[in-house]
Amino acid sequence: MDGLTESELQLITCYLRPRIISGTLANAEWISEVNDICSFDPDELVVISKEQRTEGEWWFISTGTKPPYMWQIAKNGNWEEHLESVKVTMENGETAWKISVVFCKHGSPRSIETEWRMDQFHLPKLTPLIFLCRLWKSEEFTAGINGSTNGTRLDPSKAELSTNCNGGINGSQLDEGAASSSSATSSTVETNKAQNKKEEVKEGEAGEEPVHTSCLDSNS
């Protein structure tokens, strides 16, 4: 039963299963019902919630025609799958699923991950399609610079590198810069050589005295 705690399994057995079969919730004043839960922002869900079961937890029953996080856009963002779904076979043989999603605010050009998380539990073999959802905030969350995409935070250690790349310094441009620098250096060297050669020629012409002419005359 890795992936689901004993408490989560009890909640599925005591609240989700009876709600699917009988259509009612007993002794669960802390569970609020809402349609298409992922069409709401976290702040809206906190207002909708009747009360907190424990500090920092809000619980809901969500109904819909498809998994809550799929193809739904909230007012200020959308819910995206955050972790790999967990499948568990319960003691009575039923299969239970846990889906973990994260709320990402609308951003340009990328969505920005927030600290809001939601765990969604369901029993796929039972109908109608109803989910037990736990809304909570991640205490370990630290927003990455420039946000994140598809539920993955940016590595802060790479933020400076990313900024530099956005500023036009990437691998290919560095190579081009190196090539330009090398070409400029070679050109300067060639220019200096040519200048030195001209100076040597001038010095040679200035040093050609009649001595050379005398030698030629004597040889002739």
Image (spheres, grey):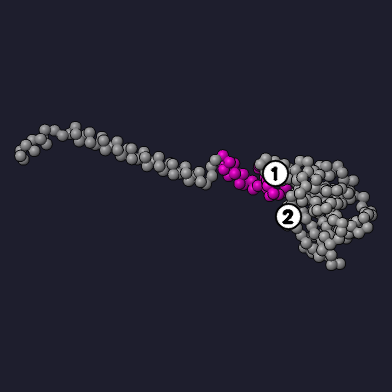
Q: Which residue shows up at 61% across the image and 46% down it?
A: 158
Q: Nearer the viewer, residue 121 or 51?
A: 121
Amino acid under disc 2: Leu
Q: Does residue 23 sit above or below 175 in this rendering? A: below
Name the image quarter holding residue 132: bottom right
Region of the chain picked out in magenta, as a range: 140-167
Q: Check residue 111 in the rendering and tell me which mark sits there, or answer none.
A: 1
What is the tally of numbered marks visible in this picture?
Answer: 2
Q: Earlier in the sequence, mark 1 or mark 2?
A: 2
SS type, badge 2: loop
- Quadrant that contains the C terminus: top left
SS type, badge 1: loop
Point out residue 181 in the picture as x, y percentages from the top left corner. 43, 41
Point out residue 27 in the picture as x, y percentages from the top left corner. 94, 54
| Magenta run includes residue 146 | yes
Left or right of residue 100: residue 20: right
Residue picked out by circle 2: 83
Q: Which residue shows up at 86% across the image and 67% down it?
A: 92
Amino acid under disc 1: Ser
